[in-house]
Image (cartoon, rainbow, N blue to C red):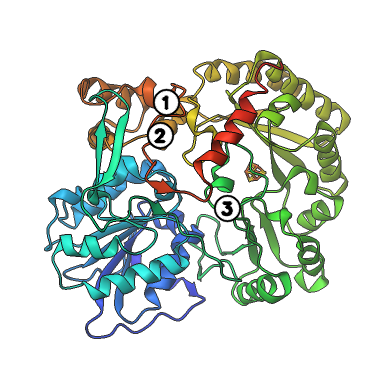
Amino acid sequence: MTASIFSAEHLLFRPATPASDAVPTIFAFPNEYSVGITSLGYQVVWAILASRSDLQVSRLFTDCQEPLPQQVELFGFSLSWELDYANIFALLEAQGIPIRSAERSTEHPLVFGGGPVLTANPEPFADFFDVILLGDGEDLLVNFIDAYQTVRDRDRYTQWLALAQVPGVYVPSLYAVTYVSPEGPIESIQPCTTGVPERIQKQTYRGNTLSSSTVVTPHAAWEQIYMVEVVRSCPEMCRFCLASYLTLPFRTPSVIGSLLPAIERGLTVTNRIGLLGASVTQHPEFDTLLDHLNQPQYDGVRLSISSVRTNTLTPKLATTLAKRDARSITIAIESGSERLRQIINKKLENDQIFQAAANAKAGSLQGIKFYGMAGVPGEVESDLEATVSLLRDIKRSVPGLRLTYGCSTFVPKAQTPFQWFGVNPQAEKRLQFLQKHLRPQGIDFRPESYNWSVIQALLSRGDRRLSALLELTRDYGDSLGSYRRAFKQLKGKLPDLKFYVHADWLQTQVLPWSHLQGPLPQATLQKHWADATAQFQAA
Ligand code: SF4
């Protein structure tokens, strides 16, 4: 089975032949193959590693693996989903490797991790990694491996010290965290020794090209898909949005010089293209790309787009997607209330939402999925009523278009202006309110689990004290009840769930990620926070 999975892959790069002294390396995705291989980030990092002749790389998933090397020296993880941490524990233990960095010796591999979860806030997972790579992998990974080669034969502490000199490489064990009290906030985060940077700067790739698939396979979750990253980050800066703030600045490769050649490469092995990015249609040359893909030679191509900004859903885009096998499109409106959208800095008017729905229908799409949140900071009851009435009016004014409203709970994300806000405990009731009023109107309301949002918020704002909790929940399961049980068991050793999840934090509080520098200075985030809160009273 495993052999047939890997032999079905079409590779779009040439793996190197490992040199005789190549470093035995495992690069793992802590979930099933179909999930991991659908992550463009995992594909790209794997290709960077496998293109080096000084590494001998094997891939590892929870359900299959390539033949693993003896005496592994480097063991890497790409973490895209928070709850996959339990699989990291299992994969390490299956290789006889202690899960905590402090319990590993030079006999064990150096365990490194990267990906969006670890870049935003690595702290709940910090005790499990020797090294965490913060930011875009392209140059960072190369610099990390080059630095490792220079200290390959040294003891683990010397390796840590040397690797900590590489910009963007975070060695958690070299930083000491103190707390106001065992159940209180953080007091300080300081390097344990001299010669280690006080703050670690997240790395930003500045090259002219972005990522595209390095492997296409029928066994991916989106089978046979070839993915092209059309933009990185988003210039809109909605105040809750990790996809924008964590990856700024907004980057757009040239359509003619970069994106079209990438798409042509993909079309040599598949007819299914996915255009990815936080806000794909904001590429300044998106129309040129669309015109190109509208040509008859692309008639057999299936096209999907990850996200579209409301006012960029033109009839032309809808027609192109419908012609290229898409049935519906997803648009994030966040709320039907213009007041609330101003609070979150979403520059979008109700008229534009109506127009997008009309354009979707005019372009022959069968449905439109709006995406929103409940419990957004500053939200009051009249905002929920505004959402209900907007969707009801759209349903009436564009008959025949299937209307879906997916709704999650606001979750604070590190490195965004809303990082200081807690989850609103009323959000669960608000989801029920929306359900009660939308479903009878024929609107397909799809709420995301409130409990899952609470767990996400816990991991999103957690500090290192959560590591013991994560080890416990592993045996208890991933329901919110399991987390509550673990909190009870650890009472007196860390703050309660409410502190991490629901409390609004003070601007003066030392954040668990205070020593990690994101793209924007703290003062800019604070200014956005102040601009938002100044509008709270205007309900
Ligand atoms: S438009 Fe979408 S991707 Fe861009 S900042 Fe707003 S929510 Fe994020």
User: Which residue is tagged 3?
Assistant: 248
Instruction: Point out the image quarter for the C terminus.
Output: top right
Q: Is residue 299 left or right of residue 66?
A: right
Q: Where is residue 40 in the image (x, y as percent from the top left)?
A: 51, 61
Tell me which amino acid carries mark 1. Answer: Val
Callout 3: CB less than 8 Å from ligand 1: no
The structure residue drawn at horizontal position 29% and vertical position 60%, both measured from the top left corner, is: 164
Residue 461: assigned label: 2
Residue 435: assigned label: none
For label 1, the SS is helix
Between 62 and 278, the one nearer to me in the picture: 278
Tag 3: Cα neighbours inside 10 Å, few (<14), some, or many (≥20)? some
Residue 534 against residue 211 in the figure, above or below: above
Instruction: Find residue 95 and report its image quarter.
Output: bottom left
Rounded to the nearest whole Å, what is the CA distance between mark 1 and mark 2? 7 Å
Residue 501: assigned label: 1
Q: Which of marks 3 and 2 is in front?
A: 3
Tell me which amino acid carries mark 2. Answer: Arg
The structure residue drawn at horizontal position 63% and vertical position 56%, both measured from the top left corner, is: 250
Rounded to the nearest whole Å, what is the CA distance between mark 3 and mark 2? 20 Å
Q: Which of marks 1 and 3 is nearer the N terminus?
A: 3
Name the quadrant where ligand 1 sits.
top right
Tell me which amino acid carries mark 3. Answer: Leu
